[in-house]
Structures are given as C-alpha cells and as structure tokens.
Amino acid sequence: MIPRDVIARWQSAAPFWATLLLIPTIWLGGIVGGWTVLLPPLITWHLFSAIDAATGLNLENADPDTPAEDLFWYRMLTTAWVPLQFITLFGLIFYVTHSDHLSLLEKIALFFGMGVITGTVGINYSHELMHQKDRFERFLGDLLLSMVLYSHFRSEHLLVHHSYVGTPRDAVTARYNEGFHRFYPRVLRQVWLSAFHAEKLKLARKDLRWSDRRNPFWRYWALQLVMITLAAGLGGWAGLGLFLLQAGVAIWQLELVNYVEHYGLTRKYLGDGKYEHVLPRHSWNAAHRATNWLLINLQRHSDHHYKPDRRFPLLQNYTEEEAPQLPYGYPIMTMAAMIPPLWRRTMNPRVRAWRKTHYPEITDWAPYTKATNPMPRGSL
C-alpha cells in the first residue's frame, strides 16, 4: 500500500503534470493532420485561459521552508520534460519528413504548434532549471535552450536581467509605451550582445580572454550545432527548416512573456549610477490558477526576483498592495501584446496608477522610458 504522505505529495504536484498532455496532442496533429495540428496553441493560449475563468485565482502560499524531499514530484516534472521534448521534437521532424500525408501548410502549422510548446513549456522549464544549484539540472536547462537556439538566454538572464531589471541596462524591461513590435527586434539584438559582454567581463576579472574554454558560449554553440546537425540529418533541408521554424516561434513566445512581465515598471534612480533595490512592485504578477499550472508559477514573478533559486512550487503570491497584478493570465496578456493599441489601452492606465502609488515624487518620467544600450562598455 502506498503511504499517505507519498500520495499527498503526488496530488499536490499533479495539476502541473497536466502540461505533459501537450506531448500526445502534438503527436496527434502529426499523425492525423487536419484541424488537429492547431491543438497545441489552442490548448496553451485558450483552453488554459478558459480554465482560469472557471477556477479563479489561487492566493494560497506553500511553506517556503518545505523540505526538499516533499518536492520530489515537482523536480521530476522539469527533469522528465527534457527527454520528452527531445524525442518529440526530433521524432516529429523524422516522421513528418518521411511521410506524405500532411500538406506543406499542415507541416508549418504543426511545427508552429511545436514552437508554442518548446517556448511556453520548454524555455520556461529551462528557466527553472538554470536557477538551481545542481549542475545536472543546469545542464538540462542548457539542453532545452539549445533546442530553440537561444542558449545565451541563460547568461543574459542570470548575469544581466536579475541585476538590472527595471533599469535602462536591462534590455527585456519593456519601456512605457514601447509596443511589442518595436521591443522584439531591439531585444533580439541587445540580449545576445549583453549576454556575451557579461561573460566576457566575468572572464576578464580572472585575467582571461573571451576565447577561454571556460566561456559558456563555447558550450552554447556546440550544443546548438548538435541540434541543427541532428535536425538536418533526420529530415534534410525540410527537417532543418521545420526545426528553425519551431525555434523562431519559441523565441517569440519567450520574448512576449518578457515583454509582459516588467512592462513600464522601473526602479527609482538614486544618482551616481545607482538604482533602488528590486522590490515586488517591479514585476507584473497573475494569480490565475490554471495558467500557473501551465507556466509552473512563473506568474508569481515578484517572488522569483526576490528568491531566484526558490523552486516553483514554493513561489509566494503577493497582494495587489505589494505587487502590481495583471487583469488576466500571461496567455491572454501576450495575445493582447501583439495588438499595440489594445495593449496600451489595457496597460498604460495601470502603469500610470502604479507610478502615482509608488513614486508620487517623480514628475518627469522621460529618462525612464528610453531604450538605451543595456550593457555600456565597462559596466557590470
């Protein structure tokens, strides 16, 4: 008989494991074709949002001092996802390029959906893994990022974003009134440069050149080359094209979420190049139950910035007085971000209210809205 405490631990983690249903769903699309190729984006963007409307908010907090052994099933989820994503991505590339029952349009739609999965789930799980102290977990995070050709996200996120969030040095803090379609190309360029520059400076402090083997970019490039070679080997030029398509969609999904998470929220400048400490008020949060299952509590974003290595089931919810709250979960908000007039109408009044509440003494916000180089020479 299974001990009650084991059953209880599994039951608490089980809703997060529902994300694994996306795996048979994408395979269904590959095998059956037709409208089923649209299921992954329909489920992640719409079904989970509909369940949010039915289940409401989850305002409860787990004990942050919960013993590690009680988190077994949560850790297993992020670990198990890595081989499942690998097998699914490359298995589909082989299957689709060696069968003729799908039209070109169906193949494109299928791998668009694959990108939604590798972006919404895969990159999000890599984010959880890269923050852990265990080297194997961090390596698993690298594997997930290499499958979408965005390995430098680890360096940029850990060395730049967490240090400079809410300041002009952080590329992914979207400026007030900056539409996503301006934000996206800027971020694609700046995050790579800032990540490389951060690692270069880190090595320079040890009197090492950027080309030293300890630069993680060598690992990033090697893993990405393996993934590209594998895709081409399994599916030829068509396989490579489908691989690149899903990677592009995944990156777009990640940066949409980045855009939403800190839009218009800036830390007060204290002078002499210094800013106030990061506070819960500097991240947008959402307590919507189902989308937090999908995103493993990423929407409890303020607490993540407070305790970056805190595992996702222990992330704490903040009240509206402590941290700004979004009207809907991230899936709906990212769809709104793709329509700038709708986004500004929804979010700009909230940003202005946030400013009046937390920084009534600041009358000129112009210096806080400029999208400058996030990593000027000699910084970090």
Image (cartoon, rainbow, N blue to C red):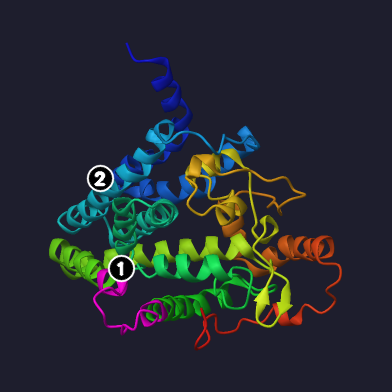
Quadrant where the image shows the N terminus: top left
Mark 1 residue crowding within 10 angstroms, few (<14) / some (14–19) / many (20+): some
Q: What's the amino acid at mark 1?
A: Leu
Location of residue 104 in the rendering, given as x and y in whole percent from the top left corner: 29, 62
| Image quadrant in which you'd find residue 204 | bottom left
Residue ID for mark 2: 31
- Report how many numbered discs are placed on residues in the image: 2
For this view, does 38 lie left or right of residue 307? left
Location of residue 240 in the rendering, given as x and y in whole percent from the top left corner: 23, 68
Residue 138's place in the image compared with 71, above or below, is: below
How far apart marks 2 and 1 lie (CA) works out to 21 Å
User: Element type at marker 2?
Assistant: helix
Mark 2 residue crowding within 10 angstroms, few (<14) / some (14–19) / many (20+): some
What residue is drawn where x is 36% and y is 50%?
Answer: 37
- Taking the view exactly as shown, the residue that stands out farthest to the front is 206
Q: Which contiguous range is marked in magenta? A: 201-219
Residue 268 is covered by the magenta coloring: no
Between 364 and 307, the one lying in front of the other is 307
Between 232 and 318, the one lying in front of the other is 318
Location of residue 80 in the rendering, given as x and y in whole percent from the top left corner: 30, 42
Q: What's the amino acid at mark 2?
A: Ile
User: Element type at marker 1?
Assistant: helix
| Image quadrant in which you'd find residue 282 | bottom right
- Taking the view exactly as shown, the residue that stands out farthest to the top is 1
Q: Nearer the viewer, mark 2 or mark 1?
A: 1
Residue ID for mark 1: 244
**First of labels 2, 1 by sequence position:** 2
Residue 273's place in the image compared with 143, above or below, is: below
What residue is drawn where x is 72% and y is 45%?
Answer: 319
For this view, does 32 lie left or right of residue 292? left
